[in-house]
Image (spheres, rainbow, N blue to C red):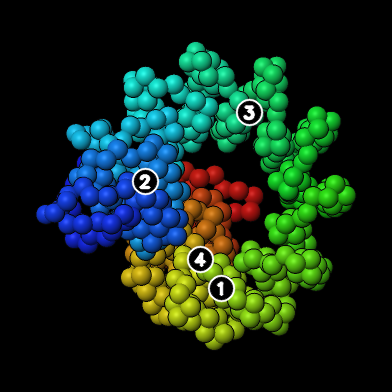
Amino acid sequence: MPRFSSSTPMSPPRLRLRLGGRHSSSTSHPSRIWDPHAAFATGTERAVFGTLTTEDAHHLFDELLRHGNPVQERSLNNFLATLARAPTSASCSDGPALAVALFGRLSRGAGRRVAQPNVFTYGVLMDCCCRARRLDLVIAFFGRLLKTGLEADRVVFSTLLKGLCHAKRSDEALDVLLHRMPGLGCTPGVVAYNTVIHGFFKEGQVGKACNLFHEMAQQGVMPDVVTYSSVIDALCKARAMDKAEYFLRQMVDDGVVPNNVTYNSLIHGYSSSGHWKEAVRVFKEMTSRRVTPDVHTYNMFMTFLCKHGRSKEAAGIFETMAMKGLKPNNVSYAILLHGYATEGCLVDMINLFNSMTRDGIRPNCHTLNILINAYAKSGMMDEAMLIFKGMRKQGVSPDVVTYSTVIHAFCKMGSLDIAMDKFNQMVDMGVRPNAVVYHSLIQSFCTHGDFVKAKELVTEMRNKGMRPPDINFFHSIMQNLCTEGRVTEARDILDLIVHIGMRPDVLIFSLLIDGYCLVSKMEDASKIFDDMVSYGLEPSNIT
């Protein structure tokens, strides 16, 4: 996320690069033929290709301020807009923040004489702050624009609305849309309405979003494909498929052509709720209207099939996608890999993975986690660890899911030393253990009778602000111990529960009483019964 500072770097950079014109030293002809238009054109081009460094950009403004030649508004605006949208690169890690910092230099002293910001300039700066989720600065630049006497246009207002909606202040955005914009002589357009409608949907205020949809039509603003797609997507996510279909029909009747986004929302809504035939029907309608399915479309069908144990059919869709010239992405491979893994088709899984690497698609952490989990569940820990150890060589860092899978597998094998070794490695690598990791270790230490270590881990969870295991977690451990006749260790579970400040319930006592009865220790069973009563618990029928 871009970082904005209240101060702007003013010291000259060590490296002085020439950005246009025939630059000469300051000792002779200090302003000879320095063309700000050419310099900014060169700077803009370098920003596009990601070769403009922060020092280069500040040097360009050094020259602008030193020579005092006014720069055209268009040249300045193009440069700032390009910086605002420049992808992160080794040369410049934060284009939006740099654009705001450079403008800050122009807003002081001599900068006002060489560059006069217009509405477009302020729109670019507001967009920079909006991308950084800095609503305070968006509002500040908007206020500054109005103070200069400039008239805010639809682009500026749309950026303000976007900032408010990003901050989950869609009600305020609605007030700006319906009152502030008309009050300042700017009639809201379809983009402004779309922004607020989408904001309401993101906040779960479906009613307000739909009301605004009808309001815009009454105001003579015709909904476009973005408007309809936003409404249809929200209704599909709410499983209101009948209403989504109604809006699709209305969309077509209004002459608005549905696109990929529209149909993908419907397909996802039907497939995720288990309505395969309806999803296929929408797909056929999509293709009949000559809307070309994309990778995401096929991925959704593959997800449905794999979820229902039909990975072989999903593989057919995967092949169809490739035949149609669509290149499967990481998500496509992960869906099918997970399907194969879930169904135990490990040969198909590894063949697909090898095909993936041959096609030049670099596996990410999620993909490798699927393989590790599949091998671990099949008891093939050598294969699982081979992938685990090779992750960093492939430039992939194991995440909490990776470690959780490996630790759980070693715990099930009873290899607690190795499990703790991976736990310590995880912490050393800066990966924060989650509740799943702790539960695996605590359960395993309890099962193997190391209650001291189990207590340490529960305490560690609490110290980290995590909720410790609940009473249901200990039910299964105690039941297993009692079934195996390990009643003494089951009693230690009760002591552990009390030690960590948890109140044992009737089932805990009942399991322990049953355990003592199974090994014919009736006197001990009777004592546990008395303990239960002393806790104020009423014996159940099972007890």
Against 233, residue 189 (above or below) is above
Location of residue 27 in the rendering, given as x and y in whole percent from the top left corner: 11, 54
Quadrant (top left, top right, bottom left, bottom right) of the C terminus: bottom right
Residue in view at x 37 percent, y 50 percent: 38
- 393 vs 261, left or right, is left
The residue under label 3 is 190
Q: Which residue is mark 4?
A: 401
Q: Tags 1 and 3 in contact by the CB under 8 Å rule?
A: no
- Coordinates of residue 189 in the picture (x, y in percent): 60, 25
Real-space Cα separation, disc 1 to disc 3, in angstroms: 40 Å
Mark number, residue 37: 2
Closest to the camera, between mark 1 and mark 3, is 3
Q: Mark 4 or mark 2, which is nearer to you?
A: 2
Q: Nearer the viewer, residue 446 or 277?
A: 277
Q: Quadrant of residue 146?
A: top left
Q: Secondary structure at mark 1?
A: loop
User: Dot 1 corresponds to which residue?
Assistant: 362
Give the spatial CA distance, label 4 vs label 2: 53 Å
- In the rendered image, the vertical position of residue 72 relative to residue 208, given as above or below: below
User: Which one is nearer the viewer's eye here, 219 or 67?
Assistant: 67
Q: CA distance from mark 1 to mark 4?
A: 19 Å
| Residue type beneath disc 2 | His
Callouts 4 and 2 close, C-beta under 8 Å: no
Q: Nearer the viewer, mark 1 or mark 4?
A: 1
Name the residue located 52 percent from the left edge and 69 percent from the top edge: 365
Which mark sits nearer the N-terminus, 2 or 3? 2
Q: Mark 4 or mark 3, which has the lower sequence index?
A: 3
